[in-house]
Amino acid sequence: MSDILVTENIQGASMNRLMNDLDVELDAYLWQNVNLLQKKIQNAKALIVRNQTQVNRELIDAAPHLKIIARAGVGLDNVDTHYAHEKGIIVCYTPDANSLSVAELTIGLMLALLRKIPEARQDTLTGGWNRVKFTGSELYGKTFGLIGMGRIGTLTATRAHAFGMKIIAADPYLAFDAPQLKQMNGKLVSQDELLSQADVISCHSPLTPHTKRLLTYQHFCRMKPTAFFINTSRGEVIDEKGLTQALLEHKLAGAALDVRETEPPKHSPLNQMENVILTPHIAAFTLEAQDRVVDSVCEDVRLVLSGKKAINVFEP
Ligand code: MLT
């Protein structure tokens, strides 16, 4: 039983240093074995997780000595932050460490969708040379609609704007004259307007009780039949079955999903669709972002365990 428990695959130079200096147990698969995790956490003072460990009431109650929960990432939907707060446990996260990587993957997925890159690759590998079949569309002049215009949404919009896209955003926390919108001549619109006007829609909403299933079949049916949908936020922000149905009925032109309702996902009809790109929640997985994320959580754990104030504290 160690002071610091790491329950998912979190590696890097700072983690190696932490393991040299302090009493750390790293088991990349521990999140899958809830009973064992509940036993191992009994003496732990620090818990380091990504997004798969469910840090719920039961787990927190099993950890009477816990001082800090450090989330290597930005989404806190797997941590009961209110209960942790109530119990006096500090919750740390890495609010801006991977935003750029997520924004870049979103742009990559958008280009891949509009230029049919995965389908063209597959066809070429099987002997094809079908140039006309893989005629795509330019980003230039298209309307890019962002659902959620926080840090990641803004970085993504800036990059899309650089391609000559028109920016529209729906976000209940954004003012119509917000500087980040003004900078790129962007417009704040309602979600319904965004759905019917955008050529590419990208979701950048955190998962909260208010955003769960924010987009259902009916919403996807309001999109242009030529439009594309991208989700690099959280799978549960959309109704995946509703999206699948809308795609089968050609209500939209295609989709790219980096995040799924269940991760890893069960078999899905989406797997067979040529106009769908599926990736395994890799938006934050770049060498640079992972270094920043791991440095940040290791630093905060060291600070808290030595009686100092953590840097990236989340206040629920
Ligand atoms: C995040 O929330 O930071 C990213 O989605 C990556 C992750 O969940 O680990």
Image: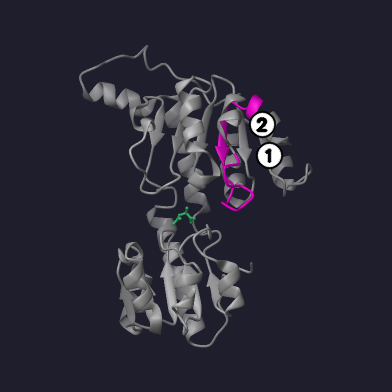
Left or right of 159? Residue 297 is left
Residue 7, placed above or below residue 265:
below
Residue 303, placed above or below residue 143:
below
Instruction: Check the picture and name the quadrant holding the N terminus.
Output: bottom left
Q: Amino acid at mark 1?
A: Ala
Instruction: Check the picture and name the quadrant holding the C terminus.
Output: bottom right
Q: Earlier in the sequence, mark 1 or mark 2?
A: 1
Residue neighbourhood size for the residue with mark 2, other residues' Cα within 10 Å, grouped as few (<14), some (14–19), many (≥20): many
Q: Using the rendered image of the protein, determine whether residue 200 is visible from the camera's viewpoint.
A: yes
Residue 91, placed above or below residue 257:
below
Frontmost residue, 174 versus 56 = 56
Across and down, in percent, residue 161 comes to 61, 35
Q: Amino acid at mark 2?
A: Leu
- Residue stretch rendered in magenta on the structure: 194-214
Q: CA distance from mark 1 to mark 2?
A: 7 Å
Residue at position x 48%, y 27% from top? 245
Across and down, in percent, residue 40 comes to 34, 77
Left or right of 266? Residue 187 is right
Number of numbered discs present? 2
Q: Give the residue pinned by disc 2.
A: 194
Give the label on residue 170, or none.
Answer: 1
Frontmost residue, 124 versus 53 = 53
